[in-house]
Amino acid sequence: RASGCTDAKIMLSVARRARCGVPAARCMSSLVKAAKDKELAKPLTIDFRPMEGWELDYYGTAPTLPTSATTSAGELLEYYETMYTMRRMEIATDVLYKGKFVAGFCHLYDGQEGVGMGLEAAATMTDSIVTSYRDHCYQYTRGSTVAEVLGELLGKYIGPAKGKGGSMHMYKADNNFYGGNGIVGAQTSLGAGLAFAHKYAEDGGVAFALYGDGAANQGQLFEAANIAALLKLPVIFVCENNQYAMGTSLARGSACTDYYTRGQYMPGIKVDGMDVLAVREAVKVAKELAKEGPVMMEMDTYRYHGHSMSDPGITYRNRDEVSQVRAARDPVDRAKRYCIDTELVTEAEIKEIDKEIKAEVVAAVEAAKSAPMPDPSELWTDIHVGQTKDFFMRGPDITTSSGVYGTVV
């Protein structure tokens, strides 16, 4: 996080670019000059649309929901760079999928970057995240490179799951990201379990269980919410309301579309998910509440692509609707406007950042394409905890089995 120190901002940006393979020396020279010319760390306040609360006094005195955020031009630049990288990565994924480089299901996150960045800006790596199959950007914000994310999509060994998980099954346990989940809503139960682990370990972490407005009607969410309330688990159930459950609009699929009120026995917060600062501040409040028990949040957001790459996204909505949301509420564009409105960052500087990030993503695509496939022996690994080389697993034919017959550990 940007700490108010220009040097800290420089190192954060260098680290971000290093994850994409950009030489540190080149990053440092350009950023040091920018830091000398601009007062990037100067505090400033930005107002945003008011949040909505539900039963905020459930655990005691109700917190005040903020209507502004204190930030800096340097911090805003960090958010913009990360969000723009998310956007370009998802656009690259779209191209790769259409070029038949990506097999299986694929769900894109473009349009929802304000949620991912805002949540991460308020979270720490001690906090756990588990989400749905729309998971590429969380793999990136939790520490993987763009090339590694794309490598997983292409089934390459450099991927976080060694190319065996694909789009829906990213994973980075060392930074408490417990991946995407291909079963609609099932991750909410896992989120409650992660919260139980945090409480048991007394490590101060909270678990974020993210799901969509369609999954909000799944029974396992209410089962998870119930046990979380009974045990007072530090879990934040986050509904990323992108307005459509696959091809079903809110009103057609939900009797109650105020998803933040669905946890009758826990506080709820609804926030503009297209505003990274609003999301950050809402998550800060939710984390404080979660010290006492579960919280339910709703992020009012929008996806630009269809539900998945097999969905054109225009049979249940029209192109004008998508264009209007892009023009009025785009989260990446809003972050850019925040940067420029500080008068410490120019349009020309933003264009230069955009140019660099586009080049970084292009290079990541090529790195993913040229990366090796997993060795066939990987078919037999990562199946059982603590399995030895001799652990026997039968193949489709006994002659293609792995290990030594009769070995069970």
Image: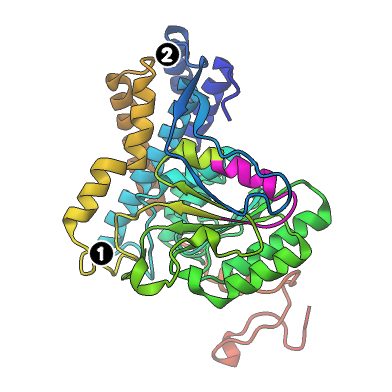
405 left or right, relative to 358: right
Q: Earlier in the sequence, mark 1 or mark 2?
A: 2
241 left or right, relative to 378: left
Q: Is residue 78 above or below residue 116?
A: above
Taking the spot 77% from the left edge, 83% from the top edge, the residue there is 407
Q: Is residue 70 above or below residue 249?
A: above
**Can I make out residue 162 in this image?**
no
For label 2, the crowd category at 10 Å Cα-Cα, with few meaning under 14, some 14 to 19 and many 20 or more, is: some
Quarter of the N terminus within the rendering? top right
SS state under label 2: helix
SS state under label 1: loop
Report x, y in % for residue 301. Answer: 39, 52
**Can I make out residue 135 in this image?**
yes
Camera-side residue: 274 or 305? 274
Report x, y in % for residue 248. Answer: 33, 71
Taking the spot 21% from the left edge, 55% from the top edge, the residue there is 321
Q: Which residue is mark 2?
A: 34
Q: CA distance from mark 1 to mark 2?
A: 41 Å
Q: Which residue is mark 1?
A: 313
The image quarter in which residue 386 lies: bottom right
41 left or right, relative to 316: right
Quarter of the C terminus within the rendering? bottom right
Report x, y in % for residue 342. Answer: 39, 18
Report x, y in % for residue 275. Answer: 42, 40
> Residues in magenta?
282-296
The image quarter in which residue 382 lies: bottom right
Residue type at tag 2 = Ala
**401 falls in the magenta region:** no
Residue type at tag 1 = Gly
Camera-side residue: 129 or 381? 129
